[in-house]
Image: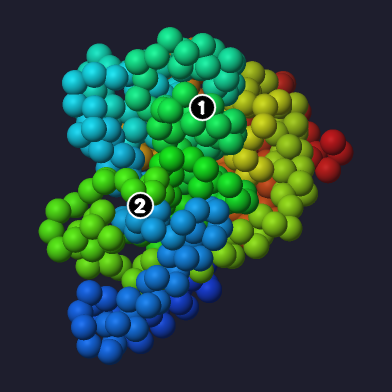
Amino acid sequence: MNASVKQRYFDHNATMPLAPEAQEVWMDAHRRAWYNPSALYRGSLQVSVLLDEVRERVAEYLQCVPGCIVFNSGATEGNNTFFHYVQRVFPQEGILLLSKGEHPSVYASIQSLFPGRYEWLEHDVHGRVDLEALEQRLKRGGCVSVSVLAANNESGLLQPWRELADLCKRYQVWYHCDATQWLGKLPARGLGACDFVTVSAHKLGGPKGAGFIKIPQACSLVSLLGGGQEMGHRSGTENYPGIASMVRALEIAQDHASKGTDARAKWRDAFEGALLKAIPKVEIVGRGAERLWNTSLCLMPGYDGVQWARKLDRAGFCVGVGSACSSAKETASSMLLQLGYSERVAKGAIRISSGWSTQEGDWQALLGAIQDIWVERNAHSADTSLVDIDTL
């Protein structure tokens, strides 16, 4: 990318920039609270107390007991940990149910650990889980867990996690909720009602390599063996600076979320409306369904998603291509294929995801860049009409 071109970041679902306040906490913790919290001298005991305090703050947001919060390296570790725990408790029998929008760390874990023991949940055209169909399946019995994320990382589709938690509790089946995308963008209140919740710090403005899993009380889950840190659930010296920075980022995100997101969703919606009029055959995945206010998954014509992303990068815009964990592979999104899109159409997907610092003008500038690329491609075509986002 030309260094003179201003860069606008539209890939917050892949990772968010470290919030300045979170960076300050991280640096201060490295200066003042670098001791091993498991040691017995004064500095270490102080870090142990600080670790308890940030655990309590996370539990307060989720509305659960502090002892249910286990700090780890992020949601991929948390998801793997959950499924290994299921395997230990139910080694030979029991069906696992999951949605078709889960993160690759969920798919890979289930396929590796439970071949032939999982089923797909029924859903609507957007991928939202059919609660009535799920209840009928749970009534038949034989299920041990349900995995449905709170918000899809590609389309932004919101799942009914509150209703899912109630339903699973009624049928005494574990509900595992990957809340990584939800937590940095929407209120956390009530997530503690889910049996297992996984989160990554870098998706909400914290540092990479930090996260947590919320577990039920009196749960015997163990992810790493060794010194017995994290109340015996995960061995290894706790990364207090990363954890403290994550919790500060969570506080900032929750403060933003409490002020409402309607205006930001309108900016995204105006962008989508203009894009659909400007370029023929564009499709917005999940348009009309309840989605994250920041996310737009666009199926683009003319180029595949990787080409669109590279051209937009040269124009000064960072956008994603499907799931961040697999976008570099230049393959079609498995989520889109599972929803019934052809491989050709799915390969045209670009994921646009804004952040708290994104302004209305950034959306307008992105639209202009996409239109410029389209016009350049069709320089010899008469069909190059433009749409002004401000006129919608």
Please tell me the numbered disc located at residue 170: 1
Q: In this view, does 112 lie to the left or right of 6?
A: left
- Amino acid carrying mark 2 in the image: Gly
In the image, residue 229 sits, relative to residue 68, either above or below, namely below
Q: Which is nearer the eye, 255 or 170?
A: 170
Q: In which quarter of the image is the C terminus?
A: top right
Crowding near the residue tagged with mark 1, few <14, some 14–19, many ≥20 C-alpha atoms within 10 Å: few
Picture quarter containing residue 85?
top left
Q: Position of residue 177 (x, y in %)?
A: 45, 38
Q: Do the residues labelled 2 and 1 touch (CB within 8 Å)?
A: no
* Residue that extends furthest to the right in the rendered view of this protein: 391
The tag on residue 74 is 2
Q: Residue furthest bottom?
A: 42
Q: What residue type is labelled 1?
A: Arg
* Color style of the picture: rainbow
Q: Residue 101 placed where, x, y %? A: 46, 27
User: Between 302 and 277, which is closer to the camera in this rendering?
Assistant: 277
Locate residue 199 relative to residue 114 in the image: left or right.
right
As measured in the structure, the alpha-carbon distance from the residue carrying label 2 to the one carrying label 1 is 29 Å
Q: Is residue 367 visible in this depiction of the protein?
A: yes
Picture quarter containing residue 327? top left
- Picture residue at 29% right of the left edge, 19% below the top: 94
**Residue at 19 percent of width and 52 percent of height:** 224
